[in-house]
Image: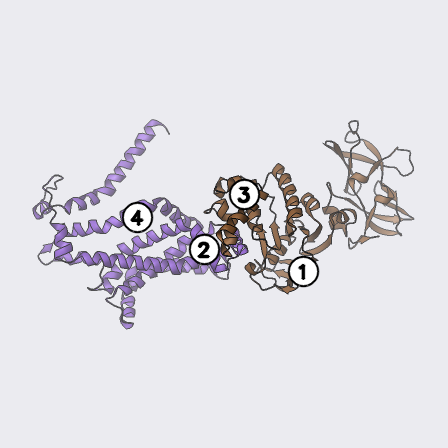
Chain colours: A brown, B purple
């Protein structure tokens, strides 16, 4: 493993545990995304790897070397900050050149490296400007160029896109993907945006309250969420989770009733909104739910049903729903192969 | 703003300006007046100017070295205060530690006691270590009050720089100290300059400590002025000449950094 966290715990002075015995390892060349809601410890993990914070216990290794107490400058890691953290008194050129200047690289070599990097990030026209004269997207590119210009093995990015507007975000996301393929460096990217995580990651680590919940390829995390939390965090909208009871191979919860492969007893049923199907009302598998809210997000439509017990169930479809109005009953079914089961008590996935 | 308000505002400003500048203009004129004009009961604006006062005090009475003393004391205490105070202010701006705000307030309280209260202990202290009647004693004494000013003002300027800048510098390859010296200090340069000028002015204008700590060698301009009060009467023309020379650097510096000065002072007020 090129980078590994071993039982890393971070407790802050005020007593909050930001990371709780994190075990995580990945290879060089990967694009690792740390994903989680705010307060999940993803930024702390990133800062620990950078050396900007010290773990309370545990070890961090890079290529077999224990770097737990090594200062940031000896770790071979570049970093992009959320607010870009450009040096406002230096030109763009000098900002990018700074890591090389510190390393006393020859002037001609600096000139060449900075130009190359600026070319790659399409900021070659702005090299003589000051950071204050740049747009958000340009400043972001300068920050990325500065983090990568000295060829560190690992590049950390702490929510680098969250200060950009929506369109620019999409664009920068594509750029980062291109950059990663081209440079073959290890990227560690922190975000709370699952779409960013899905599109960028070779593997993603989902964190919750300082603990690693699941670490896998994006498609596996989407298709086989390890527990209820991941299921409810991933997907747009998130997976429906319905608490109910199985009796004789039939799951029941309010108006929901469907055939399942589970023994009798309480269970949490999961189904993605896009996998709920419309049915003719007289079909044997059909159940009737009442539409509470209809949201048209063309080309898709979201139908939100209110089940007994206050649980909302969301359906996402591309079928034309113009005829359906709130308050109207609709017949749907949950295909058996689309169902996920979670332990009613622990929330863990059960097969 | 309507026109009448504007006229009113200008009128008030003009009054303040006249009130503030009249004494200075008076000193300036006095320094060019002969003895008769100065003591005349009818103050005159128009008179035969004389340039005798300046050489009389700076050459004949050998006050020129006092200008040099004032410069050395002010520069010395300013540099010393910045060297000690700026890193302290940086720590206050960046790090959290137990009792931080109390300690910060303590720095301010060092300025609350009337200077005269500690003047005598200070004199005894410097006598014990054998520094009385030297420039060093005054430099150290002035540093004692300028230090709190530096910590108080620079904390605001450092806090204004995002801490990610320090971290970016460290990721780029600087040590913690390197990030402070090479990146943060240049970024805080305008604030640093404003603070330095204020320290310089405080030290330059200071009279009490300097008066008590140095009798002859190393006395600054402020202490030189009372020497012009003689048993035969006060030499007002020469007093005015010294005063004009003493105020020149202050005026120049203040004009240079007035924008940052105001910002720096309001920082302390808000952040406290």
Give the number of the disc on residue B182. Answer: 2
From the viewer's perspective, is residue B3 above or below residue B266? above
Give the number of the disc on residue A4. Answer: 1
For the question of whether residue B1 can be seen, the reply is: yes
Q: Which chain carries label 2?
A: B
Extreme residue in the front direction: A108
- Measuring from the top left, give residue A190's x and y in whole percent: 64, 50
Marks 1 and 4 on same chain? no
Is disc 1 placed on a helix, strand or loop? strand
Marks 4 and 2 on same chain? yes
Number of callouts: 4
Is disc 4 placed on a helix, strand or loop? helix
Mark sitting earlier along the chain (4/2) = 2
- Residue placed most toward the observer, A313 or B183: B183
Q: How crowded is mark 2: few (under 14 residues within 10 Å), some or many (20 or more)?
A: some
- Image quarter of the N terminus of chain A: bottom right
| Of the two numbered discs 4 and 3 in the rendering, the one whose residue sits closer to the viewer | 3
Q: How crowded is mark 1: few (under 14 residues within 10 Å), some or many (20 or more)?
A: many
Marks 4 and 3 on same chain? no
Label 1 – label 2 distance at C-alpha: 33 Å
Q: Which chain carries label 4?
A: B
Give the number of the disc on residue A139. Answer: 3
User: Which residue does the numbered mark 4 point to in the structure image?
Assistant: B253
Please name the residue shown 36% across and 27% down the image.
B2
């Amino acid at each position: 493993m090129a980078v590994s966290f071993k039982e890393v715990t971070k407790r802050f002075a005020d007593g909050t545990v930001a990371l709780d015995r994190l075990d995580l390892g990945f290879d060089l060349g990967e694009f690792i995304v740390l994903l989680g809601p705010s307060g999940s410890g993803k930024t702390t993990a990133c800062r620990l790897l950078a050396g900007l914070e010290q773990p309370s216990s545990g070890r961090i290794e890079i290529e077999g070397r224990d770097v737990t107490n090594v200062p940031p400058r000896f770790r071979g890691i570049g970093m992009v900050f959320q607010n870009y953290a450009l040096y406002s008194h230096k030109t763009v050129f000098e900002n990018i050149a700074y890591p090389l200047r510190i390393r006393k690289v020859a002037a001609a070599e600096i000139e060449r490296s900075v130009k190359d990097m600026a070319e790659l990030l399409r900021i070659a026209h702005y090299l003589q400007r000051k950071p204050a004269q740049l747009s958000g997207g340009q400043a972001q590119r300068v920050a990325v160029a500065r983090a990568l210009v000295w060829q560190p093995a690992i590049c950390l990015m702490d929510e680098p896109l969250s200060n950009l507007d929506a369109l620019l975000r999409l664009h920068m996301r594509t750029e980062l993907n291109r950059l990663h393929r081209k440079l073959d460096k290890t990227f560690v990217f922190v975000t709370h945006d699952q779409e960013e995580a899905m599109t960028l990651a070779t593997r993603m680590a989902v964190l919750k309250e300082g603990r690693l919940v699941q670490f896998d390829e994006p498609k596996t995390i989407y298709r086989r969420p390890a527990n209820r939390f991941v299921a409810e965090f991933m997907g747009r909208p998130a997976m429906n989770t319905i608490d109910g009871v199985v009796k004789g191979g039939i799951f029941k919860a309010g108006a929901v009733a469907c055939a399942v492969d589970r023994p009798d007893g309480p269970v949490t049923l999961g189904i993605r909104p896009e996998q709920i199907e419309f049915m003719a009302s007289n079909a044997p598998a059909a159940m009737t739910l009442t539409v509470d809210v209809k949201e048209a997000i063309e080309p898709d439509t979201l139908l939100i049903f209110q089940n007994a017990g206050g649980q909302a169930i969301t359906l996402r479809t591309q079928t034309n729903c113009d005829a359906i109005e709130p308050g109207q009953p609709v017949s749907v079914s949950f295909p058996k192969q689309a169902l996920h089961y979670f332990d009613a008590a622990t929330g863990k996935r059960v097969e | 703003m309507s026109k009448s308000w504007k006229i009113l505002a200008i009128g008030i400003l003009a009054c303040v300006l006249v009130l503030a500048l009249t004494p200075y203009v008076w000193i300036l004129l006095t320094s060019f007046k002969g003895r008769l004009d100065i003591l005349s009961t009818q103050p005159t604006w128009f008179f035969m100017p004389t340039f005798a006062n300046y050489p009389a005090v700076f050459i004949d009475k050998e006050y020129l070295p006092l200008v040099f003393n004032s410069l050395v004391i002010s520069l010395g205490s300013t540099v010393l205060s910045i060297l000690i105070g700026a890193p302290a202010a940086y720590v206050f701006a960046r790090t959290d530690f137990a009792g931080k705000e109390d300690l910060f307030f303590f720095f301010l309280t060092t300025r609350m006691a009337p200077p005269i209260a500690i003047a005598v202990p200070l004199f005894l202290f410097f006598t014990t270590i054998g520094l009385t009647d030297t420039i060093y004693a005054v430099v150290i004494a002035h540093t004692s009050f300028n230090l709190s000013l530096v910590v108080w003002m620079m904390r605001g300027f450092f806090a204004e720089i995002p801490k990610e800048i320090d971290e970016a510098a460290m990721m780029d390859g600087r040590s913690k100290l390197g990030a402070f010296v090479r990146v943060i200090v240049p970024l805080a340069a305008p604030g640093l300059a404003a603070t330095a000028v204020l320290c310089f002015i405080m030290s330059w204008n200071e009279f009490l400590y300097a008066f008590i700590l140095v009798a002859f060698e190393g006395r600054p301009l402020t202490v030189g002025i009372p020497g012009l009060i003689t048993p035969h009467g006060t030499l007002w023309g020469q007093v005015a000449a010294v005063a004009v020379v003493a105020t020149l650097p202050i005026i120049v510096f203040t004009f240079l950094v007035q924008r940052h000065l105001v910002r720096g002072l309001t920082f302390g007020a808000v952040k406290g």
